Amino acid sequence: MTGGPGKRKGRLFVVTAPSGAGKTSLIDALMRDDPSLKISVSYTTRAPRPGEKEAVDYHFVDVPTFRSMESRGEFLESAEVHGNHYGTAKRVILEAMAKGEDMILEIDWQGAQQVRRLYPDCVGIFILPPSVEELERRMRSRGQDSEAVIRQRVANAKEELAHAEEFKYAIINKDFETARRELANIIERERAKP
């Protein structure tokens, strides 16, 4: 993957996991350890959670704005997850990769399928919880969702887990530090490839 003579084109890493598997925490740790990686900030129609910041965690937009962006082809991928819309800005990804920057997309499995169709050489990484029971325990410990939302997320997670085999790599996040090292090693190995 080169962007011209002597210039390496950036790699695209697609990281997916069901809600509560630890994907965001692992990526945050990876970004602290390796600031040369760039993360795409997705657009969403969901309300910000406590502590989330505009343009850091997400770009928070209303449904009409999202639909307008979608109809103009501004998204590399978009999907509806848990009743909210999410999308990745195409321009940001393409510009960064053209400059040789490695990008991480933190997206759901539906979006990952769209990206893999467009960029078959992207590196797919699926983060798995040790079990569905542990996933549910993690969701409850966050204290952010109602019982009904947790039940729906667990049901959705079971469907999402069935797609793990579609990814080049799978990491079981039983121990955070072990999973963090495994994710970093995958990134390092893939970056070393010509």
Image (tube, rainbow, N blue to C red):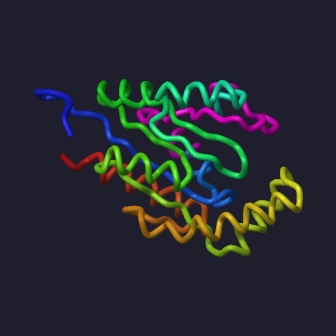
How many numbered marks have been drawn onto this rendered protein structure? 0
How far from the left and from the top, in percent, is residue 136? 76, 68
Q: Is residue 50 magenta?
A: yes
Which residue occupies the foreground of this view, 107 or 34?
107
Task: State whether residue 33 appears in this view.
Answer: no
In the image, farthest residue toward the front = 71
Q: Specify start and end residues of the magenta stretch as a single range.
A: 28-56
How far from the left and from the top, in percent, is residue 188? 34, 50
Residue appearing at x 30%, y 54% in the figure: 189
Residue appearing at x 66%, y 35% in the figure: 44
Could you tell me what secondary structure mostly forms the magenta stretch? loop
Residue 151 position (above or below residue 188)? below
Quadrant where the N terminus is found in the figure = top left
Q: Is residue 133 left or right of residue 66?
A: right
Which residue occupies the foreground of this view, 15 or 177?
15
Q: Is residue 75 left or right of residue 129?
A: left
Residue appearing at x 37%, y 62% in the figure: 168
Task: State whether residue 10 appears in this view.
Answer: yes
How far from the left and from the top, in percent, is residue 112? 47, 51
Which residue occupies the foreground of this view, 106 or 37?
106
How far from the left and from the top, in percent, is residue 120? 30, 50
Q: Is residue 157 magenta?
A: no
In the image, farthest residue toward the left = 5
Which residue occupies the foreground of this view, 140 or 25?
140
Q: Is residue 54 left or right of residue 192?
A: right
Q: Is residue 24 left or right of residue 101?
A: right
Residue 179 position (above or below residue 9)? below
Residue appearing at x 72%, y 28% in the figure: 62
